[in-house]
Amino acid sequence: MDIWINLEINEGQPYPSTHLTEHGALLAQCGDILDFLGYGQNIDVSSVDEWRQLLENWGIDDSHEVLWDYDIENWEQKDLEDMRTFRNLIVELTWDAGCVDYTIEQTKVQP
């Protein structure tokens, strides 16, 4: 049976989670990345405003239309392909931080 592993390594410490589907692993990892980036922590503004402020804080302006105009309010509702694309876009924002790494691996349950 195939399973998917979401692996976050933060300052050398691994934080794995296992999932029955790739979509589940992507949901978890995107949530982890958004949390690391600081999304979802400001309840006083709209999701869109918070998203755009987050992007500005990480050096992304409105010239990056794909991220700037992303439907952040519905990111969890996306299909597998859209979720892969979103994950690949947001994980790049973490690269300059130097203290985190994210990967998703497929493996099999062993007896």
Image (cartoon, grey):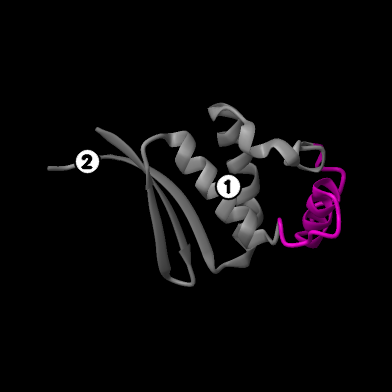
Image x and y of residue 98, in percent: 57, 67
The residue identified by callout 1 is 30
User: Spatial distance from mark 1 to mark 2, Cα to Cα?
Assistant: 24 Å
Label 1: how many Cα within 10 Å (few below 14, some 14–19, many 20+): many
Give the number of the disc on residue 109: 2
Image x and y of residue 73, in percent: 74, 40
Q: Amino acid at mark 1?
A: Cys
What residue is at 82 percent from the left and 37 percent from the top?
69
Q: Quadrant of residue 3?
A: top left
Q: Which residues are magenta?
A: 40-65
Q: Which quarter of the image is occupied by the C terminus?
A: top left
The furthest residue to the front:
43
Image x and y of residue 89, in percent: 65, 43
* Badge 1 element: helix
Q: Give above or below for 3 relative to 94.
A: above
Q: Earlier in the sequence, mark 1 or mark 2?
A: 1
Proximity of marks 1 and 2: CB atoms separated by less than 8 Å: no
Q: Which quarter of the image is occupied by the N terminus?
A: top left
